[in-house]
Amino acid sequence: MRKVVITSNMLNEANNYLDEWIDNMKQLTDTGIIVVDGGSIDGTKEVLEINDIIVVTDNIIQREGYGPARNQLRELAKQYFPDAHWECHFDCDERIDPSDFHKFRWLKDYLNECYYDVIGFPRIDWYDRDKIKSANNIRINPDFQARMSRLSCSVRYEKACHEQVVPTKGIYLNVDTCPVIQHFHRSAPKEKRDQVGRLCSFLHRKDDEAGIKYPKHHKEDMYYQKYLEEGL
């Protein structure tokens, strides 16, 4: 059995179904959970700690961006769980349905190490927590997320916003055999959605200044104005 460490970056998630996330992630990991907290003031850290989750305080996403933050999660997984094989990260508004647990376990235990260092999970973006209306169809737009990587390899995540992984071998992508990430950002509290929007607009500018070009989100200018007025 290949062990997996579940990791996450969080900021003020106590009112964003955090207990539900913890229960879900505990069913996926066979080692432990590590969360890098960006400086929560709403009790997020306390909820995590009473659930035996390792909490490291660092505002690395606000300071450096998502790519460096994902690399930090890999290093922390190696530090705290040196016998683990995989690191896998999920945001607080993401879940894996119990019906997909067997896919997650099968991949972590049996995916051929000769060909793949990274697993990308398809992600469905829900407007509601009852999963009635979605923003994408995973058969047409699977929105693959490169979330699970072997700790023995040298993969790294690049870019401040919309990070991309640079694998040494390859990324395993398959809609049928990979578990689906159930993403509930659109149904999160407005305050949380606005905070993420401000942060991503700020980080996109950071990439742009570094010469990394990609299209803007259609609401990015609005969120960047909010960032200028309210900060991160």
Image (tube, grey):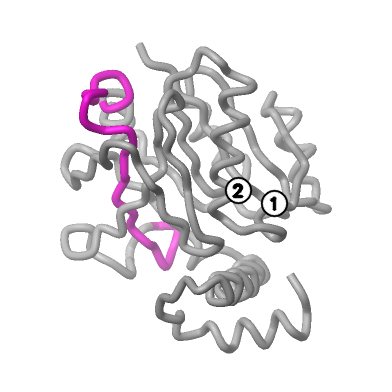
Q: Circle 1 sits on which residue?
A: 60
Q: Earlier in the sequence, mark 2 or mark 1?
A: 1
Q: Mark 1 and mark 2 in contact (Cβ < 8 Å)?
A: yes
Residue 109 within the magenta-colored segment of the rendering: yes
Report if residue 190 is visible in the image. Answer: no
Report if residue 230 is visible in the image. Answer: yes
Give the SS element for disc 2.
helix
Please provide percent x and percent y for residue 66: 56, 55
Q: Residues within 10 Å of mark 1 (few under 14, many from 20)?
A: some
Give the answer, above or below, for where 212 lies relative to 10: below
Residue in front for this viewpoint, 166 or 13: 166
Please provide percent x and percent y for residue 201: 58, 76
Q: Circle 2 sits on which residue?
A: 69
- Please name the amino acid that badge 1 sits on: Ile
Residue in front for this viewpoint, 67 or 51: 67
User: Total number of numbered labels?
Assistant: 2
Q: Which residues are magenta?
A: 107-130
- Please name the amino acid that badge 2 sits on: Ala
Residue 95: quarter of image: top left
Is 184 on the left or on the right of 123, as rendered?
right
Residue 155: quarter of image: top left
Give the SS element for disc 1.
helix
Residue 148 within the magenta-colored segment of the rendering: no
Position of the N terminus, as image quadrant, is: top left
Compute the Cα span from label 2 to label 1: 6 Å
Please provide percent x and percent y for residue 30: 48, 18
In the image, farthest residue toward the front: 211
Q: Residue at x 53, y 76 (%)?
A: 208
